[in-house]
Image: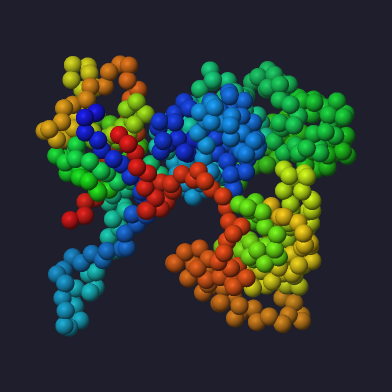
Amino acid sequence: MIALVDCNNFFASCERVFRPNLISKPVVVLSNNDGCVIARSNEAKSLGVKMGAPAFKSERFFARNGVHVFSSNFALYGDMSKRVMDTIRPEVDEMEVYSIDEAFLVFEGPAAEERARALREKVERWTGIPVSIGLAQTKTLAKVATRIAKKMPEMNGVFTLSSSCDLERALHRCKIEDVWGIGNRSSSKLKSYGITTALKLTLADPAWVRRNLSITGTRLQKELQSTICSPVNDASPRKQSIRTARSFGSEVQSLHALNESVGTFAANCASKLRKEGSCCISITTFVMTNPFKPQAPQYNASRTIKFEVPTNDTLEIVASAIQALKFIYRDGFSYKKAGVLVSAITPSSEVQLGLFDVVDRSKRTSLMTSIDTINTKLGHDKVRLAVQGFDRKWRLRQERLSPCYTTRFTDFLTVKV
Amino acid sequence: MNRKIKLKWCPASAVAFDAVPFFDEGVQAGFPSPAEDHLDLDLDLNSYLVQHPSATFCCRVEGDSMVGAGIQTGDVIMIDRSLTPHKGSIVLAVLDGEFTVKRVDIQDDTLLLIPENPKLKPIEVGEESNFQVWGVVTFVIHKV
């Protein structure tokens, strides 16, 4: 059996582990920069707080309804995620960590559901994080099963989708847009052909699916028909692209301030590439104004630059990001967000050298290794390019950040007993 | 609760000690030590203090209700959530939404939280109170 384990309201649950006074109270976690709601406890869901609700519009509602609001604390969530995954690993035959709060598992042999129930209890006891587990023949079906495990309290967090009548009923109830891997575009296309549920997709003509949804659609249809197309894979796949983007705490107008932030994002991307042993071929810089202020002049733009030789060199990547920014920067706008995306990622070991390459690659590599070593020892961005600056006017707004209880020695929470 | 204990959280991973070399001969100086070949593995205090890394948390203690058990203000306690509490275990518990550290005991079917301080009285955990053991305290790290 393939299982999907999914942490319930993960970020909100992490906050609650260290704040037991918030158990059974409405809790929400805001996105980077306190922008919008990205996690809700069940109590917050029942109050009608919507995913993605802009925080500034909901302030009054939160205060009136006693909703506890947190800035996102990714150091804490990352550590708790690692604890959850480490707790699961020895109990299963195979495991693929799919996201910060989800993992696909394989239970071989009989009694899969009993093992899943025992696992669910273990994770909650060891880490304090409640999880739901869905079991089925394929990943896509396991995803459907997990939704049912979450929605039906009488299942106690574990649901197996095995008998054919269960399967048919579940797929009939599963809306097409809720099927794992169906994007917005595919779902509206499918709906226009009357395929509104997962069940209808399983019954569609395979040739038609192939023609209209390409190979991805075919694989999805097969997975819904209980044929494995996407096995549980231990090795995490190399990322296709790395993106660093932030909304600014306060809007910025000057090219100088944008240079600082874009330079920092690009440097982050470069160090992430090196950590993975990867290089990128292209880099995109984008900027945007605040869409929540429609009366202010609006401007969004992006520019992509390609490298002659795939690279993970901070100097090259930052220089190109800033060059791209110069192309797109326009005076007279208040920018709310900027970001950098590096893509077409290849392993460093497979990089083709350029015939007319003018960069001394081996020298640069040892420079980058030194920078990484120093920054690992002394702290993030201790050695940085001058363009990254020290002002950080654009830096995150995190007004309700909880302490990094599990990763920072100095981050103490004082609990009144 | 008549005496307050204040707890401060700190990370298990931050309590990573530099490896302490362990000599099983006495320390010698002056000439090359015949014991050099016997320099044993580096002692890893984490492996001594942390049995289940993903279930172990640390926090800092403020208060004197547990001095009898050697838990004093400023100490770091290690908490293992994977362990089952028994009669006599010292636990980090949540009583009506608040953290506390006490020894658990059961007398005449009543759950008691026993402070380790003669000035303080045991706390009876009634049926109506909201009680949960957060984890079992396994070690106290006390700076002398």
- B63 with respect to A180 (left or right): left
For this orientation, the residue located farthest to the left is B118
Q: Quadrant of residue A136?
A: top right
**Which coloring applies here?**
rainbow
| Residue A268 spot, x, y in % from top left | 60, 62
Is residue A272 visible in the rendered image? The answer is no
| Residue B128 spot, x, y in % from top left | 32, 16
User: Total number of numbered labels?
Assistant: 0
Is residue A297 visible in the rendered image? The answer is yes
As drawn, A66 above or below A312: above
- A321 with respect to B38 (left or right): right
Q: Residue at x 77, y 59 (%)?
A: A332
Q: Residue at x 18, y 26 (%)?
A: B122
Q: Residue at x 47, y 64 (%)?
A: A379
As drawn, B60 above or below A141: below
| Residue A100 spot, x, y in % from top left | 56, 44
Asked whether A155 or A60 is in front, the reply is A60
| Residue A260 spot, x, y in % from top left | 63, 65
Asked whether A253 or A224 is in front, the reply is A253
Q: Residue at x 22, y 16 (%)?
A: B109
- Figure quadrant of the N terminus of chain A: top right
- Figure quadrant of the C terminus of chain A: top left
As drawn, A291 above or below B130: below
